[in-house]
Amino acid sequence: MKNNLIILITIIFSVIFAQNTELNITKITVLGNVEMEEEDIINFSGLSINSTINAIDIQNCINRLWLLNKFEDIQIDIEDNNRYKNLIIKVIEYPIIDKIDFNGDYFKFQLFKFKKSKSKLKEMMKLNKGETLSSQKIKESIFLLKEDFFEKGFHDVEIIYNSENTSIINRKKIIFTINPGNKTKIKNISIFVNNKKLDTEKGIKSLNYFLKSNALINKTNIIKNLGEIKVWKWYNPWKGNYSQEKLDLMEETLSSYYKSNGYLDFSVKNYKINSKNNELILDISLGEKYYINDISFIGNYIFNDSTLNAILDINPGASFNGYLFEMSNLNLTTLYRDKGYLFSEIIPSFVPITNDSLNIIFSFNENSIVKVNQIIIKGNNTTEENVIRRDISIFPGETFSQSSLIESARKLFMLNYFDNVIPDVKRINNTEVDLVFEVIEKSSGQLNFSAGYSGLSGFTGGGGFSFPNFLGKGQNVSVNYQRGISSNNQNSSTLVNPSSQEVESNQQFSFSFIEPRLFDTSNLIGISMNYTERGQSSTYSMPFDSKSYGGGLRLGRRFNWPDKFFKGTWMINTSIREYYSINESDLLSYYSTGIQDYISYNGDKYIFSTSGVNIKQQINRDNRDHPEFPTSGSHFNWTFTFSGDFLGGDEDYYKNEFGLKWYNKIIEKFVLHQNFKVGILNPIEGNSGRSIVPPSARFLMGGTGQPYGEMLRGYSDNMIGPLGSSFPKGGNVMLKYSLELRYLISESPNMYILAFADAGNVWDNINLVDPFSLRRSLGIGARVNMPMLGMLGYDIGYGFDSSVQEYLNGNNNAHGWEYHFIFGMPIY
C-alpha cells in the first residue's frame, strides 16, 4: 500500500507542479488521528507552515510517517484557494491492543496432557497490551506459536486470529483460536533409491543386483545417517519428533555422509511427511561411486611431488573418501604453514574422467615465508610475563610455524594456571605477523583437602593448601596438614586392639617448594619436609603405631629426546621411623623374628626404629590436550626407587612402578579414559642381616586410595591384598586396570559424570601373581573441579569379589556396595 500511495502522490504532484515546481504552504491540517497529537504528526512529517515544498518533499514526508509504524494508511491532499494553500495529512492509525485472549480445542481438559498457560503463550508471542496492532505483528505472533507446537510434535496445528471492537475508540480485543490437532511422530520411513523403493527384507530384483556392489546403500545405513530424525518405537517413545530444522539437517547429514564415501553426485531429490500414517517418504539419487584415477600438483616449488604425495591419506585406485580428502588437504596446509608459508593457498579441484572415476588436482599459490614480528601476552593480571613466555616454543624473528603455535598453547594450558589460552595471529603485511596469546587466569591458591569417604569406614583424610602459581612466578608452594577423622568402631571387623595405640590419631604435616624452571631454564629444583604419625587402624596396614620424619631434595629437567613431551625428576630422601606397640608380638608378626634384637623397651611400650636413604627417579611423558578433562593424548609414568644398601640406613629395597593413562574422544563431550598401573617391590638383603621394607613402601589398594594406597572403587580402604596375622599388610606386587566413560557437563567449572569398571589386586611376590584373580567392580560417579577447592567427587561402586574384610568376617561373598566421597584429590 505504501509504494502505491507514493506512486499516486508522485503522479498528482507531477501534474500540480507541471507549470510551477514549488508550492508555498500556508497551513497544515491533520485528519483521522486518534492516539497521536496533530502537532506530533506535523513535527514527524518534517514539514512546516510558510515553507516551500515540491514532490520530493511530499515523498520524504510520507516515508518519515511510515517509519513510525503507527499508521495503516497515509494520504496527502492540497486545498488551494485565493487566501491560503492548505496541506491536509489524512491518516488511519493502527488500532491499539486492549486485551489478548485465547480459546479453541487446545484449552479443553484432557487428562495427562500438559499445556502452557495463557500468560506463557503471550510471552512467547512477544505481543503486549498497549502495543499497536498490525498484520505483520499478527503473522509473527502466529509463527512463534506454531513453531512451539511444531517442536512438541503438533504439525497440523491451526491458529486463527480475530479482533473485536471495545468500548474505547481504536482499541481492539485480540482472540487467538488454537486447534492443535493430533500429535504426529515419524513411525515409518520409506526410502526410494533412483526412483525404486528400497526394502531391507524383500527388495527389488533390479535394485538388489546394484546394491551387492554398494554395501553402503541399505535401508539400515541410510536411517542411521539421518541426523536427528529417528523412528518412533513403543520402547523409545521419545523418538520420532521432527521439525523443519531437523529435516534440513537430515538432508545435509545424509548428503555429507554419501559424498564423503565417493557418491559425489548424491542428492536428496525430495522428502515429505505423510501425516495420515506418520511416514517419512525419502527420495534420493545416488549417482555413481567415484574412484580416484590420478592425483597431481600444480604450482608447487617449495616441496616436490613425492613429498606432497607422502603426506596424503588418499591414493589412486581407491574409492573417493571425503573425510580422508579433507585430512589430506589439512596435511598439505599444515606442511606449508609449519615451514612459514602461512598465507599459502591450496585449491583442490576434481576432473571427471569417466562416469565413475576422477582426477584430483591440487593447485598451489605458495606466496612468501612469514616471520614472527613480536609475541604479545594478554590477560595475565597475576602471572608474570616471563612465566608464560618460557613455555612458548616460537620466538620473534623466527619463521612462523603452525605446529609450534598450537604446541605453545597446549603447554600453557597444561601448566594448569589458566582457565583458557587463546592463541591468535595478527597480520602485519605479507611477510610478518604478530602472535597473540590471551590467557584467562585461575585463582592462584587452592585448598587441598585430601578427604575420602567409604560406606564402611566413613571419612578419612585431612587438609592443606597449595599455591601452584605462587605469586605469579610459576613456583609451587604446598603446606599440608592431614588428620584422620575415621573411627575404628566404624568397621565391623575387629582388627585393632584399641588399648595398644600409642598414637591416638593419624596426622601428617608436609611442606614442599618447587621451582619448575630454575632461572627460566628447563631445570627443576625443589625441597620437601614431612612429619607423620599413624595410629593402628582397621583400614591401615600395620598392627602398631608409627612416627616418622624426613626430608628430600629434588632435581629435574625437561627433555627433547625421545620427544619434547618427556621430563625426568631425581630425588634423594632421608627418613627416620619409629614403630610402637605395647605387645612385642605385634612388631614381630609384621616384620619377622629377625628384628627381635633391635627392639627396645621403654616404659610400657616396645619400640623398633629404622632409618632410610633412598634415591627416586621419575620419567614422565605427557601429551594430554587438557589438564582437567583430557580428550586425547596420554600420560606415561615410570618411577624407580632404590633404598638402602650402599646408600646407608637399614631400609633396603628397590621398587618399580609403571603407569599409563590414555584418552580417546568417542563423540563430542564423550571420552574413554583407560588407566593401567603395575608395581613391583624387591627387598634387598642388607649386610647386617636386617633387611627392612617400611610399610609405607608396600602396595595398598581399595577405596579412594587416600591417603596411603591405590584407588579401587567398590571396596573399603586398603582392604585388597595379602593378609597379615589379623590385618591387611600390603604387598610387593600390584596390578590394576581401570576404564571410565566420561561425559562433560560443564567446562567452567569443569564438571563431568562417569561410569567406571575397575579391576586390581596386590600380591606378596611375583610368583603368586594371577591376572585372572583381580578384584572387580562397576559403578558410576561425578567430578567437579571447584576454584580454590580442587577436585570434588562422589562414586558409588559395587565390588563383585571378596576382600580382606570378608575373609576376616568369615565369608567369601561379594563385597557389595561402597560409597566414596573424594575431596581435593588429583584428577584420576
Image (spheres, rainbow, N blue to C red):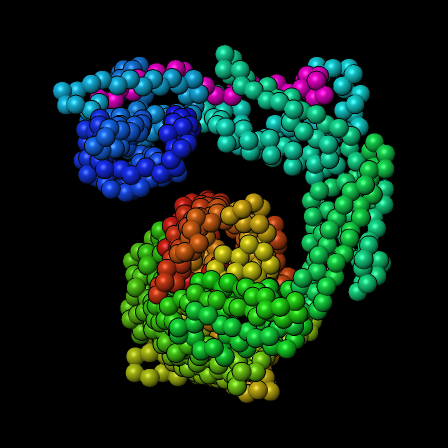
Residue 191 lies in the magenta-colored region: yes
Residue at position x 16%, y 23% in the image: 169
Left or right, 50 with reference to 428: left
Residue at position x 41%, y 31% in the image: 18
* Residue interval drawn in magenta: 173-201
Q: What is the quadrant of the N terminus in the image?
A: top left
Residue 736 locus on image (x, y percent): 56, 57
Residue 200 lies in the magenta-colored region: yes
Residue at position x 82%, y 63% in the image: 301
The reply to whether residue 510 is visible in this rendering is: no
Residue extending furthest left? Answer: 167
Residue 97 locus on image (x, y percent): 23, 27
The reply to whether residue 105 is visible in this rendering is: yes
Name the foreground residue: 381 vs 341.
341
Q: Is residue 790 depicted above or below 594 in this figure?
A: above
Q: Quadrant of residue 392?
A: bottom right
Q: Quadrant of residue 551?
A: bottom left
Left or right, 258 with reference to 279: right
Left or right, 219 with reference to 695: right
Residue at position x 32%, y 56% in the image: 458
Residue 588 locus on image (x, y percent): 45, 73
Q: Is residue 611 depicted above or below 346 in this figure?
A: below
Q: How many marks?
A: 0
Name the foreground residue: 118 vs 94.
94
Residue 250 locus on image (x, y percent): 57, 31
